[in-house]
Image (cartoon, rainbow, N blue to C red):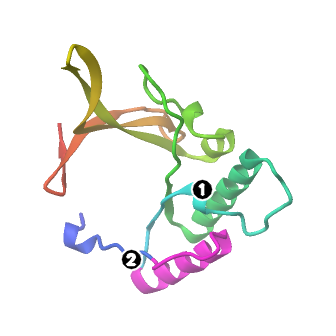
């Protein structure tokens, strides 16, 4: 049975004060009990810190620890966790996994990595070519540990609904 959009309700916590993953785990446990949560969206990784913060000044090690803890949490709680991570600015090419800032720990532990990019168009303004963002985007699977397939889809958000292009 496919759920209706009205059945896909969002229940965001008001805020996190520490960003520690033990707080996130507690909120996931509450959401599972109260709402039978199956999907968790975390926006974004830079707000998080591992439950046991080691004394490391290397951000990439901390990001790896965060991803490891989230993956363990997802398996134990039987939920799917979507984790937003921002990428470096790229020009004249598609986003790759290595563009995720300080990323090896993020994409090595992930079962699936997806990029979402807004599509631009080129306009001539006073004989100067500039790129202008459009209302169209492309979602592309960069890594798929389950099937290996890497599909993409072009879409636009029109009147608060995703329209496939």
Cβ atoms under marks 1 and 2 closer than 8 Å: no
* Vertical position of residue 150 compared to residue 91: above or below: below
Q: Quadrant of the C terminus?
A: top left
Residue shown at 47%/37% (left/top)?
147
Please identify the quadrant where the N terminus is shown: bottom left
Residue 64 visible in this rendered orientation of the protein: yes
- Residue 6 picture quarter: bottom left
**What residue did someone put label 1 on?**
46
Query: Which of labels 1 and 2 is toward the front?
Result: 1
Can you name the residue that lies furthest to the bottom here? 34
Identify the residue at image location x=24%, y=63%.
2
Q: Which residues are magenta?
A: 13-35
Q: Residues within 10 Å of mark 1 (few under 14, many from 20)?
A: few
Q: Position of residue 107 (x, y in %)?
A: 60, 41
| Marked residue nearer the N-terminal end (1 or 2) | 2
x then y, percent, for residue 119: 29, 32
State the CA–CA distance, disc 1 to disc 2: 21 Å
Locate residue 143, reporting x and y percent.
Answer: 51, 36
Across and down, in percent, residue 108 comes to 65, 41
Say which quarter of the image contains residue 67.
bottom right
Q: What residue did someone put label 2 on?
A: 11
Can residue 4 be seen?
Answer: no
Is 22 included in the stretch rendered in magenta? yes
In the displayed structure image, the side of residue 139 where residue 51 appears, left or right: right
Q: Is residue 28 above or below residue 140?
A: below
């Amino acid at each position: 049975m496919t759920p209706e959009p009205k059945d896909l309700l969002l229940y965001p916590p008001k805020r996190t004060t520490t960003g520690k993953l033990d707080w996130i785990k507690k909120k996931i446990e509450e959401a599972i009990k109260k709402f039978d949560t199956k999907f968790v969206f975390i926006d974004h990784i830079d707000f998080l810190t591992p439950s046991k913060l080691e004394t490391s000044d290397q951000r990439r090690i901390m990001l790896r620890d965060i991803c490891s803890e989230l993956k363990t949490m997802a398996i134990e709680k039987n939920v799917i966790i979507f984790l937003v991570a921002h990428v470096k600015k790229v020009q004249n090419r598609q986003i790759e996994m290595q563009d995720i800032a300080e990323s090896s720990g993020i994409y090595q532990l992930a079962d699936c990595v997806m990029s979402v990019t807004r599509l631009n168009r080129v306009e001539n303004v006073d004989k100067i070519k500039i790129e202008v963002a459009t209302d169209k985007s492309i979602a592309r699977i960069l890594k798929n540990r389950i099937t290996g397939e890497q599909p993409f889809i072009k879409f636009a958000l029109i009147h608060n609904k995703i329209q496939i292009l």
